[in-house]
Image (spheres, rainbow, N blue to C red):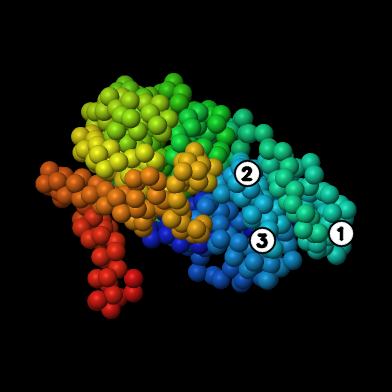
Amino acid sequence: MRVALVNPMFRLPIDTRTSPHMGLAYLAAVSERRGDEVRVYDADVEDQPLARFLQEFRPHLVGVTANTPQVKQAWRTAAAVKQELDVPVVLGGSHVSVVSEDLDFESLRQPPVDIVVRGEGEGPWIAISDLVESFLRDQPEFSVARLMAPALDLFRGLEGVSYKTSDGQLHRNDDAPIITDLDSLPWPAYHLFKMERYTNLQPATDAVDGARSFSIMTSRGCPYRCTFCSQSIMPIKWRARSAENVIAEWRHLVHDLGALEIGVLDDSANIRVKRLHELADLLVAHKLNHVPWIFVNGIRANLADYDLLVKMKRAGLKRTAFGVETGDERMIVKIDKHIDHDTIRRAFKNAKAAGIETIGFFIIGLPGDTRESMQRTIDFAIEVDPMIANFSMMTPYPGTVVYEQVKQGGRFLVHDWEDYVFFDQKARYEMGDLTAELTEEMYRQAYRQFYWRPRYVLRAMTRKDFWLNFGRNLRLAWRTIVPRREKTELRRAMGVSA
């Protein structure tokens, strides 16, 4: 059976061509192991129109992925598929997994979407593929209408699946069980992606060639439930691959695919510290530590002891992030972070002592934030002094506690899923005394105060990557100096499109 997997164009004010879509890479791998002929269409890097791709490949089944700001583009992509072929379209990803808001049904109400997969997709995807292939064998004149006919009711027993029958009825089956044995999964099918068209995972100190920058996931799930985190809709149970299984894939990325940089994408990689010690030992033993690697999403600060960080540095770890979120003691309790600032201070100190570059993630405009609490966040960022401070304005994603808080006691300033991006300097909600103007003001102030310190500027100018990424740094400076509304007026005065 021929299977197409599509990543719709992601319209963001940043470069989204950093790395292949991990979820689609895993789905492609399990489909290939099932015996399917698989093709991947990543609209962020493709130069071939989708219509031509579909007509040349003529898949029997199409899967489309979507997060929240991407979902409307996914609906348009599904419609484009239906214009070319009468095939079932399956929509998956984080957005449609928020059952509490009926977002699976919202997508199913779109005429071109036939089936929705919720949560971890590999199991439901294979079940759907088996069903469609069986139906194709038994039906010489295949059509989606016949596949989804109410009399057939083929999808009743497929866990983790929502679907609509051809009479328009919507159905939601029970959740699928989580995948407990991650070692049983095949490695992501990177050979199906145009790897030479991707950039790098993060701006690299050594300007690593992005064409050979790969991702790896060594664990899934997160036992924590921070109020702001969109990952809270995914399984809470933390599961890990064995160190031996990870090393086998790591060796494949380095020796077979020529990786020059590896990004670990786990949400909570260091929940089991002993496993990371084993992984670091094996990276050294197998002489894989010459390839630099980073924790893209960071690690838990309360589990970042000095001995572990030193060992991981020896194993090739170049950079890690820590989720700080807020510098206010009251706010860190309100967001259920389950950590204290002394522990965070110690984590940054340990990482720097081990020779590891650091990134700090900070949020401006959490529910309950005030000018004073946001200033404390800025001050704390300056105190721990990471190499990169990533300030973002709070975006209340559906399925999070913050989303419910805003729905009950605040006011959303976004009314379209495509506005749920968090890189364009706009506040997404107001609540109480926390106005959009205040949030945006403190966001700009955070970048100004952190990045325009003489000490930081001098330190940055001595780094090779500062000059290699000079254009990016110039855009950052523009963002911090001129308020968004003044930028718009300035562009108009210059005759430039806003």
Q: Position of residue 70 (x, y in %)?
A: 52, 57
Callouts 3 and 2 close, C-beta under 8 Å: no
Sequence order check, earlier mark of 3 and 2: 2
Sequence order check, earlier mark of 1 and 3: 3
Real-space Cα separation, disc 3 to disc 2, in angstroms: 16 Å
Quarter of the image for residue 110 reads bottom right
User: For this rendering, which residue is in front, 52 or 144?
Assistant: 144
User: For this rendering, which residue is in front, 63 or 2?
Assistant: 63
On the question of residue 280 being in view, the answer is no
Q: Quadrant of the N terminus?
A: bottom right
Residue 139's disc is 1
Real-space Cα separation, disc 1 to disc 2, in angstroms: 33 Å
Q: Position of residue 34 (x, y in %)?
A: 70, 46
Callouts 1 and 2 close, C-beta under 8 Å: no
Sequence order check, earlier mark of 1 and 2: 2
Q: Position of residue 54 (x, y in %)?
A: 64, 67
* As drawn, 385 above or below 71: above
Circle 2 residue: 99
Q: Secondary structure at mark 1?
A: loop
Q: Position of residue 246 (x, y in %)?
A: 50, 33
Asked if residue 134 lies left or right of residue 207, the reply is: right
**Point 42% across, 59% down: residue:** 12
Amino acid at dot 1: Gln
Asked if residue 257 lies left or right of residue 125, the reply is: left
Residue 110's disc is 3
